[in-house]
Amino acid sequence: MKFDSLSAALIYGSFLAGAGMLNSQKEYINELNVFPVPDGDTGTNMSMTMMSAVSALNEVSDTDSLEQVCKAVSNGSLRGARGNSGVILSQLLRGFTKTLSEAGRLDAGTAAMAFNKATETAYKAVMKPKEGTILTVARAMAEKASQISADTDDVLEFLDQVIDYGNAALERTPEILPVLKQAGVVDSGGQGLIYILMGARDYLKGEISDDEVRTQLSIQKSTGGEKTSYGAKVEQTKIKFGYCTEFIILLKQVFNQKSESDFKEFLESIGDSIVCVAMDDVVKVHVHTNDPGLAIQRAMKYGQLNCIKIDNMRIEHHERVLRSDELRKAGVKKIAGDNEPVREDTMITLEKEPKTYGFVAVCAGDGLKSIFESLGADQVLEGGQTMNPSTDDLLKAVAKVNARNIFILPNNKNIILAANQAAKLSKDKRITVIPTTGIPQGVAALIAFDETGDTESNEKEMKDAALQVKTGQVTYAVRDTLIDDKDIKQGDIMGIGEGRILAVGNDAEDTAFDMVCEMVDEESSLVSIYFGEESDEEKAASLSNRISERFPEVEVEVDYGGQPIYYYIISVE
């Protein structure tokens, strides 16, 4: 089989096949995480980014123009980008589709230009590009594409050579990044990129059928929301199941294929629009039902629940109808562009005069949420480890804050790029991202805010305050590995701080104490302990006493965080 060029329909199908291949391998990609922590989520973030683009493709078809297909892929991935790997992937797709859209075709020569534009766009999106990552793999494939584009007119042959060269570059990533070599893995983001291209190639070779490809669209249709045009009347509809219910199960027992099948069968008996995705030791659940309690009660058989979200769709729909009537009576016919779907981040807000400053913070844990709210956060977006919010999630949170200038506190290094992307996409509000990499940095930044200061001075003060904080986290290892010269076994307790393993042990409190001893120096004056849902106040108090005895000149504070996965989050200032 030979292709001189690809039609819009073939590109459409190739993209869906690439998304499907990535989705099928996401758990393997997650396992390539350098630190053996239970939140290695590169595969999940890349897959969710791709599936957001698939959802956007649901609004077009394979009979539409190449320009429409490219626009859907670019816009969908841009807004659905999650985590650093997802944001970089969205930028690769943005550059690639921009070239295709402008050229109006895809042959070997155009593909080479598209690969190079994709790499250029992705590198520009990262403030300090690091080699040995997905960027290195993308650049290697772009270089190979340029070398061979004049030598072949067969797109399949071209793609085979580019993938082979990309795989070779991927295998070299441990030689570029010593931390990969020590952990015995290749770069996870680069591996994800290879899988996307492999899926596209296998589709073109006929190894993946159109029916298999269509399943990617059906997954998205099961969770698709109501789409309405700007200025259009919102019609009254009868909603069969009134509560949109979402939660994550933190598994405490085996959740095999039979368990998953039984649970899905139960969900189908009480509702529809069901998505149940098992990832390692967590299960993400979405269902529309009239009795959320039944879903929650059944789920608790398998483990603890986190990130519970229940929305009354009947009330939301009724409010949307009233809002539509208000806008029509006020003579509002259009809010943004023609024929665009209504989005929370672009809707007119019929509220009081906006205040000068507002805050959006990201964290997981009811205790941490309360802390941020008490410090002045207007919106606390649930997320962080294991579930990085997308660019669109951040934009929706921003839209709910009635302020002209909004500071976003990502509180996780894997959310910063998505926050930066949200800042660029925001049209009506000025967004400033304070690049906090942990909860304690976010707390310090909020405390440093001065309401009487201007945005620039506050940005500087908040960033400076965050940089004064050392952060350590205590969790468990999900696999055996050797890292930072420490031999770690599955189930060991690890204290991770400042990007490295500071302590390893068999007890959470002992490991936390050893970690703090590594973090405290002669300039330290305050240690703050946030204990998670797997710990308790008594254990945290005992740990506090040990630290006070060891460092009598240092003040120690204890707060309930309620965070999952991490027994303790500890800061040293």
Image: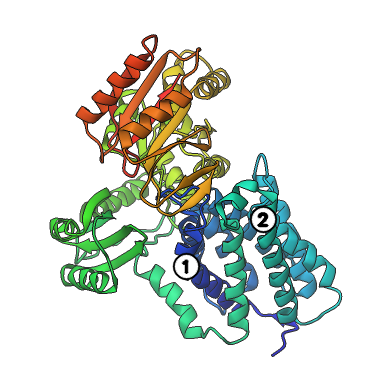
Amino acid tagged 2: Thr
The residue indicated by pointer 1 is: 23
Q: Secondary structure at mark 1?
A: helix
Query: Sequence order check: which comes first, mark 1 or mark 2?
Result: 1
Q: Secondary structure at mark 2?
A: helix
Viewer can see residue 200: yes
The N terminus sits in image quarter: bottom right
Residues at discs 1 and 2 in contact (Cβ within 8 Å): no
Residue that appears at 51% across and 63% down: 50
Residue that appears at 34% across and 69% down: 222
Residue that appears at 52% across and 32% down: 498
Crowding at mark 1 (Cα within 10 Å: few <14, some 14-19, many 20+)? many
Residue 343: x, y in percent? 43, 51
Q: Is residue 367 above or below residue 554?
A: below
Q: CA distance from mark 1 to mark 2?
A: 23 Å
Residue 121: x, y in percent? 69, 52
The residue indicated by pointer 2 is: 173
Residue 100: x, y in percent? 70, 67
